[in-house]
Image (tube, grey):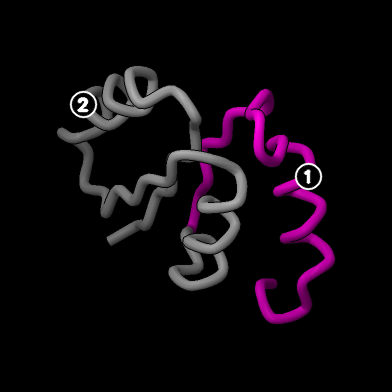
Amino acid sequence: MMKLLIVDDSLDAMAVAKIRLAKENLNILCADGGTAGLEVARREKPDLILLDLDMPDMSGFDVCRALKADRNYA
């Protein structure tokens, strides 16, 4: 089963995405911000990340850079 990580600081947006994707054969993980998303991504190694770019604690661009620079993630 494919793992999908949804990272968004808007709980409403995250809930809508999760509901819309629930019928697919996915293991859906959620994180409520960039820092939390980075931690979940490193721990769970999802196949796909749906990532909000504009978040207050850590932008989606920063999350992407951190994952790209992490040799243990790739």
Q: Residue drawn 19% across and 35% down? A: 22
Quadrant of res 39: bottom right
Element under disc 1: helix
Q: CA distance from mark 1 to mark 2?
A: 27 Å
Determine which of the numbered discs, if any, sits on residue 48 in the image.
none
Judge depth for marks 1 and 2 and give the one in front.
1
Q: Residue drawn 72% across and 35% down? A: 59
Badge 1 is on which residue?
62
Dot 2 surroundings within 10 Å: few (below 14), some, or many (20 or more)?
Answer: few
Dot 1 surroundings within 10 Å: few (below 14), some, or many (20 or more)?
Answer: some
Does the residue at mark 1 contact the one at mark 2 (Cβ under 8 Å)?
Answer: no
Quadrant of res 11: top left
Q: Where's residue 69, x and y in %?
A: 84, 66
Viewer-proximal residue among 74 and 25: 74
Q: Residue drawn 44% across and 69% down? A: 44
Residue type marked 1? Asp
Residue type marked 2? Ile
Q: Which residues are magenta?
A: 47-74
Residue 72 on the magenta segment: yes
Q: Is residue 65 above or below residue 32?
A: below
Q: Residue drawn 69% across and 81% down? A: 72
Q: Is residue 19 above or below residue 27?
A: above
Element under disc 2: helix
Sequence order check: which comes first, mark 1 or mark 2? 2
Q: Is residue 37 above or below residue 74?
A: above
Badge 2 is on which residue?
19
Q: Where's residue 53, x and y in %?
A: 67, 28
Quadrant of res 10: top left
Viewer-proximal residue among 11 and 43: 11
